[in-house]
Image: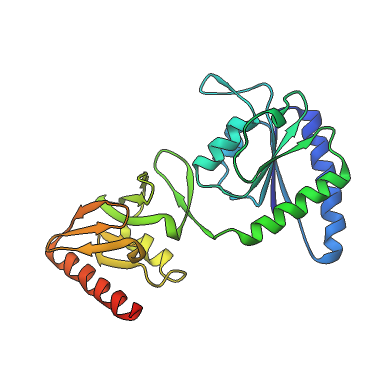
């Protein structure tokens, strides 16, 4: 399992590295290996192109864009990028216990105790095993973004080698890729992904209806597409409805 530490207190960070190293040695007897990366500031972690299985975070003197950020602020930023794995906020100078925490964000007290760290690693591994796999996207202006296939509504290539990923919650993400490349990368794991043209692909799970030149998704989004593309969408709808009985 890949583990990330982000702590701007160098002594605490080095101590966590040592403790996790010992935990990895202990787990290696059961063929479980921890791959540990350590960061001293939020910028470094946010720019890392890695989706870690568990995060241990504490920030007491860091800033982003000139504004102070603490561990919970960073945890929320990770969630905004689509990271859904377990996050532990390490409580020392800041008591995160008193703050409102989202699901899968927990507290662990400093100084870190070996038994509590072992429990945290096991908890994170158990939660990781239940998570829906996520797809990694390199965005144009927001670094790496992760989304599950179920969150994808459609891809639309608006200009050469630049496509927009639309999500079921209404968000849109700019991706420096052709739709064709996105389709070929995702199709092997999700064979129902439908390309209705060279510049438009969609998740048919969210397709509600198709008219002459428009399609409507289950979240209410209506998209104008070409005649041939709409015909492909209608055929897919007919096929799926026939299969459903």
Up the image or down, 65 lies above or below 12; here it is above
Q: In the image shown, does 3 or 238 lie closer to the viewer? A: 238
Up the image or down, 10 lies above or below 181; here it is above
Can you say which quadrant of the picture contains the C terminus? bottom left
Q: In the image shown, does 89 or 101 lie closer to the viewer? A: 101
| Outermost residue to the front | 245
- On screen, residue 12 versus residue 132, left or right, reads right
Residue at the spot 36% in from the left edge and 61% down from the top edge:
181
Please state the horizontal and vertical placement of residue 65, each as a whole percent of the image.
Answer: 51, 23
Please state the horizontal and vertical placement of residue 54, each as a whole percent of the image.
Answer: 68, 48
Q: In the image shown, does 184 or 150 lie closer to the viewer? A: 150
Residue at the spot 88% in from the left edge and 44% down from the top edge:
114
Which quadrant of the view contains residue 88? top right
- On screen, residue 168 versus residue 103, left or right, reads left
Up the image or down, 127 lies above or below 234; here it is above
- On screen, residue 194 versus residue 36, left or right, reads left
Residue at the spot 31% in from the left edge and 57% down from the top edge:
218
Q: In the image shown, does 79 or 1 lie closer to the viewer? A: 79
Can you say which quadrant of the picture contains the N terminus? bottom right
Please state the horizontal and vertical placement of residue 213, each as a whole percent of the image.
Answer: 13, 60
């Amino acid at each position: 399992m890949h583990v990330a530490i982000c702590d701007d207190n160098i002594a605490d960070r080095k101590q966590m590295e040592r403790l996790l190293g010992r935990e990895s040695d202990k787990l290696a007897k059961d063929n479980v290996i921890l791959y540990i990366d350590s960061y001293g500031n939020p910028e470094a972690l946010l720019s890392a192109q890695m989706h870690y299985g568990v995060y241990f975070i504490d920030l007491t003197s860091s800033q982003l864009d000139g504004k102070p950020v603490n561990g919970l602020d960073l945890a929320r930023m990770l969630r905004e990028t689509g990271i859904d794995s377990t996050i532990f906020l390490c409580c020392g100078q800041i008591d995160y216990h008193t703050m409102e925490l989202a699901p899968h964000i927990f507290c662990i007290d400093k100084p870190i105790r070996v038994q509590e760290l072992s429990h945290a690693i096991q908890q994170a591994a158990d939660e990781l095993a239940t998570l829906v796999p996520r797809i990694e996207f390199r965005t144009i202006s927001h670094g790496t973004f992760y989304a599950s296939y179920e969150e994808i509504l459609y891809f639309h290539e608006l200009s050469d080698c630049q496509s927009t990923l639309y999500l079921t919650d209404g968000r849109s993400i700019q991706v420096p890729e052709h739709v064709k490349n996105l389709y070929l990368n995702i199709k092997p794991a999700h064979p129902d992904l439908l390309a209705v043209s060279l510049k438009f692909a969609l998740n048919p799970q969210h397709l509600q209806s198709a008219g002459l030149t428009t399609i409507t998704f289950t979240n209410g989004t209506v998209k104008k597409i070409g005649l041939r593309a709409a015909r492909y969408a209608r055929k897919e709808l007919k096929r799926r409805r026939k299969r459903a009985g």
